[in-house]
Image (spheres, grey):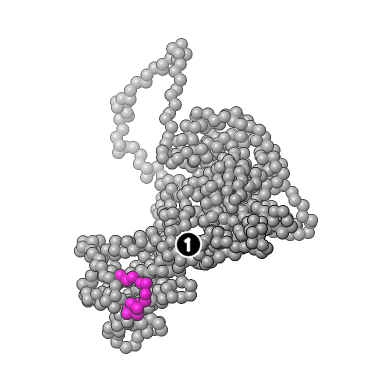
Amino acid sequence: MVREQARTQTIPSLQQPLVQGLACAALQPGLRSILVFDSSPAMLETAVGLWAEMLAITTTQGSVQSVYLGPTETEESLWGSMSLDPENKTQPFVWKAGLLGNDSDTRIVVIPDLSRLSLSAARACIALMGTEMAQLERHGHQARWRSQLGWIAGCPRSQIKFLSPHLLDRFALRLSGQEFQRCDRITALRDWFASLETPQTKEPTLPTELCQQIEAAQQQRPDLTDAACKRGLAYFSDGEGLRRELTLLRLAQAQAQLDESNLSKVMPKHVDLAARMIGLKLVSTEPAQEEPTLPESEKPEPEAEAEPFQPESLPDTSIEDAPSQESRSEAPVYKPDIEAEFPSTPVELNPVQEPYPEDHTPTERESASLRLPARRFRKATMGRGPVIGVEPTTVPQDIAWVSTLLEAAKYQAMRTSENGTGLTLQPTDLRRYRRAAVPEQLLTVVLDYTCLKECQWQEALLPYLQWAYIERASVCLVQVGAATAGQELQAQKVSAQSVLVPRVQVALEQGAGLATPLAHGLNLAQHSLRHALQHGRSTVQQAVLVVLSDGRGNVPLEASQTNRKPTYLVNRQGIKDALQEAEQIRRLKQVESVVLNPQPKYYSELPIKLAQALGAKIADIPTLNVWEVEQ
């Protein structure tokens, strides 16, 4: 009921870019993979309802059903699995098709948020989008069918940097959800209250005129001209592939079908309309066309040449005699107090954003985001992570009992004749859960912001961040003396599942504060390492601790824990507390510690004592030159 109410809140019109894009996708099968940027759930539901009615017209089907994919989809729910049918005595095991199973009917696959799609569903999108035939071989079941799926997904533009380029490349048509005009809230509330008083009757959402226009466009097949192809190539540069060019030309062909002038060919103006709808801009300008030459008899007679401009024709008036601008103005002119600065270029109202933001968006995804990472500690991580499927196993751990019994029941007709009655299990029947990968390694960085001014700390820290990226390790960043710290006497911790999380980069770019609670920072690092390595069913098998500090802690641990400034003379109490916390970290197993020495001018022995207390390796950071510090 909520979806029907959301659909009635929109008055569709081909003047709206989203409705026009849906109509073009209904006419052209090659455009039936749509990505809608910055779309709300209600707006996406409305677009799905409109597109379903358009596909029902173009595919001559009574109704078009829709299925939804989310972050919890598995291989079994997508492709299908064997299920038990107790009523069927002759063949108790039947194949239960999944959401994307062998069904030749036209359906719409809806992905509310593409950035949260599961790994299995993302692989399914890449396998099925743009294919005419689909083939499935799973658990002894073989099927081959004609795929007639339409895909529509919503995704915020800010999340594009986390998605795989192979997945984004499968979406042919890119539209913007912000351009979709909806009626005001007062009208929506009135319609909703009116629907409560009157009985619910299902009326078509599409107007009759729009339905007739789509039916008429379905009967037309305009041909593609060479001029339209050249115009389409002018919107792209070399080396971008043919997917985008084919999408633009298909969209232009659909525009020609919807043209009321009933043209039989696709003209360059249709290409321009299609490019304007999705937000494309010209990359290369076409050369000017040569004018046709006329015969000598039809050429116009040349006009008489005008005499050149002579300086003697000027009047004998000097510049001083000419009236000045000040004498022309009768009313006084006052200069405004505030000078308004206008932009040099005109401002475009409601600009259409480009359809391919992944070309210039900085990458923050994993290197192989469509594959499971390699595990270094398979036995230790067994039984961790969310379940994404089942697989054969020879180890009696994390057994999937239902799948094991179903596998054994397939052969009971043969096994019962040999061993009598009862369910017989064999080692080949064992199945275990296939689980998603979880971080097995942890990178903990204690960063002292008060000692970073005169050293090249970015280059020294970069190898450890690269190691965390390659190993897909989780990250724990302890900020000591940051300018943005909530409490000046305390350190703060930033945790993330990957080094590509944006808040890690933001935390690394902070400035330096006044206090240096080094002891509290090491205390936070100790508790984080102990919790990751020893708490419950831990998955972390290796931890790397990187401490970048000059060892000059001026805040005692007691002052940080109580968040009160000490009333006594501190002296070296902060340094002693930091060394004591470092000795406790040294007792932890499976922790490899490294101290990056910024080589301070004063108390240069403190980083060495800190490394000795941690039992860590020490590496010197190159210092900056005098001219680099002054700049």
Determine the residue positioned at 22% across, 74% down: 604
Residue 389 placement (x, y as % from top left): 55, 59
In the rendered image, the quadrant that contains the N terminus is bottom right
**Residue 211 shown left or right of residue 494 in the figure:** right
Determine the residue positioned at 59% across, 30% down: 222
Residue 479 placement (x, y as % from top left): 37, 71
Q: Residue furthest front?
A: 418
Determine the residue positioned at 24% across, 67% down: 620
Q: Residues within 10 Å of mark 1 (few under 14, many from 20)?
A: some
Q: Is residue 409 visible?
A: no
Number of marks in the rendered image: 1
**Residue 77 shown left or right of residue 529 in the figure:** right
The residue wearing badge 1 is: 437
Give the residue type at disc 1. Ala
Vertical side of 447 occupied by 584: above or below = below
Q: Is residue 455 visible?
A: yes
Residue 459 occupies which quadrant of the picture? bottom left
Residue 49 placement (x, y as % from top left): 66, 50
Range of magenta residues: 581-594
Foreground residue among 85 and 547: 85
Q: Is residue 586 magenta?
A: yes
Vertical side of 529 occupied by 114: above or below = above
**Residue 528 shown left or right of residue 21 in the figure:** left
Vertical side of 244 occupied by 191: above or below = below
